[in-house]
Image (cartoon, rainbow, N blue to C red):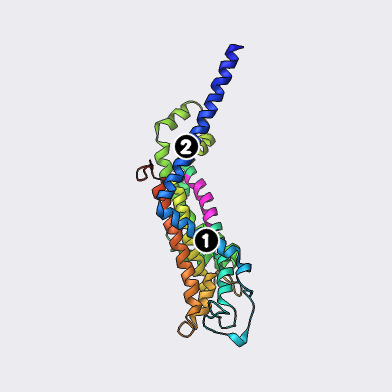
């Protein structure tokens, strides 16, 4: 009975120590995050932009497709904060609702790119046969400029938000896979991986239980960059007529509508352009900040 009691006490003590370490780790992470101004400011701007587009119906009295020919090409005013376009539609409303499309396309593209790129990179790093096959496919895709390959894919599939997400994912997966593969190759050569293999661990456990957690730092940083690049690509595709089709608003096709009257109605291009710049800048700041935050060589604990 005494042995059982000691064993139980030791087990409870071990659990308590793990919880204490987890709590200390979280406190250390938040101290580092507060000290990392780049990640803090970038993340805050991204959250504010996301909240801004989510509460769009409460910010305006207009709808994005509401036409008012009597008030076409009106400059910014109290009634129309960002002015109106050549159909009399409220630009502020279209920018806010268009932000939903642009940010959702960017987020979905980054998410899919991250998931597929992670799998491709890990399998390529672990299996040498797959490495040659998958990396040659990636090399072939990387040979094409991003925008040209995306245009070709949307031309085949058709211009709509889902196909834009598919096109951007295909374009961005090779770079993500190469970054994950590079980090995974370093981890694969570590001594503890060889020890785990010697203990009889299967490939699934080694890849997802031991290699994958150690490549998350460059992975998360790259995901933020893909998010920013996806917003730019979506805007470029929509501007060229290969992305989100009119009259559904997105930041790209609002820019396209404004290019015809850019010298007489500057507000049609300036405001959606500012939102693209702000979102991409915030995501790049977040990515740079995460790079410093997750890098043990550059990030120091705050006492």
Horizontal and vertical percent position of residue 292: 39, 49
Question: x, y (%) of residue 252?
Answer: 52, 71
**Between discs 2 and 1, the one toward the N terminus:** 2
Q: Quadrant of the C terminus?
A: top left
Residue plotted at (50% across, 68% down): 235
* Crowd class of label 2 (few under 14; some 14 to 19; many from 20; radius 10 Å): few
Query: Does residue 277 sit above or below 72 in this rendering?
Result: above
Residue at the far bottom in the pictured view: 70
Is 161 in the magenta? no
Magenta stretch bounds: 109-121
Q: Position of residue 79 (x, y in %)?
A: 58, 80
Local crowd at mark 1 within 10 Å, few (<14), some, or many (≥20)?
few
Q: Which residue is mark 1?
A: 48
Q: Is residue 285 visible?
A: yes
Which image quadrant is residue 145 in? bottom left
Which residue is more in the foreground, 119 or 18?
Answer: 18
Q: State whether the magenta stretch is mostly helix, strand or loop.
A: helix
| Residue tagged 2 | 24
Name the quadrant containing residue 128: top left
Given residues 28 and 171, the one toward you in this image is 28
Indicate the secondary structure of the residue bearing disc 2: helix
Marks 2/1: CA–CA distance? 29 Å
Residue 113 within the segment the image draws in magenta: yes
Q: Residue furthest left?
A: 298
């Amino acid at each position: 009975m005494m042995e059982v009691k000691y064993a139980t006490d030791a087990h409870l003590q071990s659990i308590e120590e793990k919880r204490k370490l987890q709590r200390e780790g979280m406190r250390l992470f938040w101290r580092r995050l507060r000290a990392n101004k780049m990640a803090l400011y970038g993340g805050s701007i991204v959250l504010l932009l996301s909240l801004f587009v989510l509460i769009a119906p409460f910010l305006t009295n207009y709808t994005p497709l509401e036409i008012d020919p009597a008030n076409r090409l009106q400059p910014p005013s109290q009634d129309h904060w960002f002015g109106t376009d050549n159909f009399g539609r409220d630009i502020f409303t279209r920018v806010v609702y268009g932000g939903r499309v642009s940010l959702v396309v960017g987020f979905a593209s980054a998410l899919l790119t991250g998931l597929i790129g992670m799998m491709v990179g890990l399998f390529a790093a672990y299996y040498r046969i797959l490495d040659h096959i998958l990396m040659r496919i990636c090399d072939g895709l990387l040979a094409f400029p991003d925008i040209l390959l995306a245009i070709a894919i949307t031309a085949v599939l058709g211009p709509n938000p889902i196909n834009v997400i598919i096109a951007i994912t295909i374009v961005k997966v090779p770079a993500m896979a190469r970054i994950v593969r590079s980090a995974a190759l370093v981890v694969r050569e570590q001594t503890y991986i060889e020890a785990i293999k010697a203990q009889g661990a299967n490939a699934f456990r080694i890849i997802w239980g031991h290699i994958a957690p150690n490549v998350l730092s460059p992975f998360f940083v790259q995901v933020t960059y893909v998010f920013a690049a996806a917003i730019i690509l979506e805007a470029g595709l929509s501007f060229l007529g290969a992305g989100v089709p009119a009259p559904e608003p997105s930041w790209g096709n609002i820019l396209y509508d404004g290019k015809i009257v850019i010298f007489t109605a500057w507000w049609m291009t300036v405001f959606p352009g500012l939102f693209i710049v702000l979102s991409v800048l915030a995501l790049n700041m977040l990515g740079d900040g995460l790079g410093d935050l997750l890098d043990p060589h550059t990030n120091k604990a705050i006492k």
